[in-house]
Image (cartoon, grey):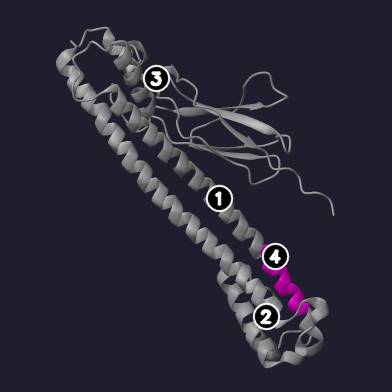
Amino acid sequence: MKITITNLYRIAKKFIGALVKYAALPVTHISQSTLTAALKAAKAKRSAHIAAIRATRVAVTKQKSVREIAIAFATACRDALVPELGRDWSSAWVPAGWKNKLSVPRTLEDLEQLLEDLHQFLTDNPGLQDDKRNLTIADVQDMLARLEAAAQGLSAAKTAQRQARTAREAADAALMDEARGLVSELDLILPESDERWIEFVGEVPSDEQRPEPVEAVVLSADVPGELDVDWEGSVRAERYQVCVLVVGVDQDYRHVTTVKDTNATISNLPPGAVVKVRVVAANAAGEAAPSDEETATVLALPKAA
């Protein structure tokens, strides 16, 4: 059995169980306790990495939301300036931020530049402020601050995700060293035909062509009634079956889609429901064991105003 990142945790668990069962084996370099500690550390770093991925998704959604609010705000500011600067674009609009047309930009960079110009314009022309329509220097400054905070939040989330991934890779590497060290030592102790290898490896030869189980499933609930599912690719997998269980509705898991990629979107879920998801890798030889289940709450529909 070749140990890879995709089967590392499962094989490590098998090794730990087998070391306990065959405690009499003269294994001297890799103990059950050291392997257990390495597996625990790797799982913790994996959980931290998954949490960081989710935090980045939240930060992306937050920035998109703030951008839409800023677009609406800039549109309202433009409308409030029409009585003074005119309904049609002219050079009078340039100092206020509208350089060549009266449409509001949608890109963050252009939107921030417009608001910065508008802030300076109102500073130079304080009499054009309109408290009733939220067209004040303070309002513009507040919107710029919200955009900046959202950008900083996303940048921090991406940095944390990179750091979490680096830490996870280091922990996985340490566990891999322990696992491969055990295999090397077992090679000196057990004959190739010894049935105790099955206890350590966890597979019989007839199953070797099946894919490895999927690990590290990540769920994201960003749209009402939908879940985004991401996972790491599995060795020898040709396709992936995504199965769901809606808590309180389904009695067992049901298949919803089969994909070749390592991501899928599950639609038509009850808003606000608690949903469990697992992914099964498959190929022409058969199916792997299901992934560990992950649970998420589906985003509810926004309340009517």
Label 3: state its secondary structure.
loop
Tell which tag, 3 or 1, sits nearer the viewer. 1
Does the CB distance between marks 1 and 2 fall below 8 Å? no
Mark pair 4, 1: CA separation: 19 Å
Residue 183: x and y in percent read 23, 22
Mark pair 4, 3: CA separation: 50 Å
Q: Is residue 236 above or below residue 158?
A: above
Outermost residue, front side: 33
Q: Which residue is mark 3?
A: 210
Query: Which mark, residue 57?
Result: 1
Tell which tag, 4 or 3, sits nearer the viewer. 4
Residue at 67% x, 46% y: name it: 223
Q: Which residue is mark 2?
A: 101
Residue 146: x and y in percent read 62, 68
Query: Which mark, residue 69?
Result: 4
Amino acid type indicated by mark 2: Lys
Label 1: state its secondary structure.
helix
Does the CB distance between marks 4 and 2 fall below 8 Å? no
| Of the image marks 3 and 1, the number of the one nearer the N terminus | 1
